[in-house]
Image (cartoon, grey):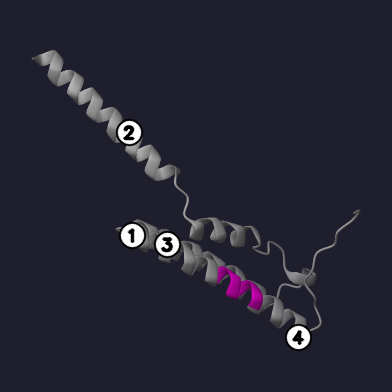
Amino acid sequence: MIKTIATAMVSLGLATAAAATLNTAVILDEERLARQEEARIITAPIGGIETHFWFDYRANVNEARKELSSDLRHATDTEDRRDAWEEFRQELAHERTHYVKEMAERGYRYGTVTVGS
């Protein structure tokens, strides 16, 4: 009897662990896209000029990260997590675009240089 109960508890524990692993291994499309957008975060001021636009950009990126963390903590289902990641992606894209546009209007261009083929 005790052996049967112990075996059932072990089986239940393994099933729970497997389900938890499966749930954490799934990456939502929204998360993947947000991670790609996150990789595009500008890490140094355009033209090396630290203007209020640079500081606003950095503050807004940090705020978006905090909001994502809060939204994910309070998410109750997959749709909530999707919404949180999508909102994060949109905020990062908007802030980057706004910062680049403001600096371009002041004569500082943002771009990348590719060397080789």
| Kind of residue indicated by mark 4 | Glu
**In the image, 32: left or right of 25?**
right
Pointer 3 with pointer 4, Cβ within 8 A: no
Identify which residue, 88 or 27, lies in the foreground: 27
Q: Could you say which quadrant of the image residue 2 lies in? A: top left
The residue wearing badge 1 is 75
- Quarter where residue 114 is shown: bottom right
The CA span between labels 4 and 1 is 39 Å
For label 1, count other residues whose C-alpha is less than 10 Å away and answer few (under 14), some (14-19) or many (20+).
some
- The magenta region covers 91-97
Q: Position of residue 45 (x, y in %)?
A: 72, 68
Disc 3 crowd rating (10 Å Cα; few below 14, some 14-19, many 20+) is some
Give the alpha-carbon distance from disc 3 to disc 4, as whole Å.
35 Å
Report the residue marked by disc 4.
Answer: 105
Q: Nearer the viewer, mark 2 or mark 4?
A: 2
For marks 2 and 4 on the same chain, the one whose residue lies earlier in the sequence:
2
Q: Gap between marks 1 and 3, in whole Å? A: 9 Å
Label 3: element kind = helix
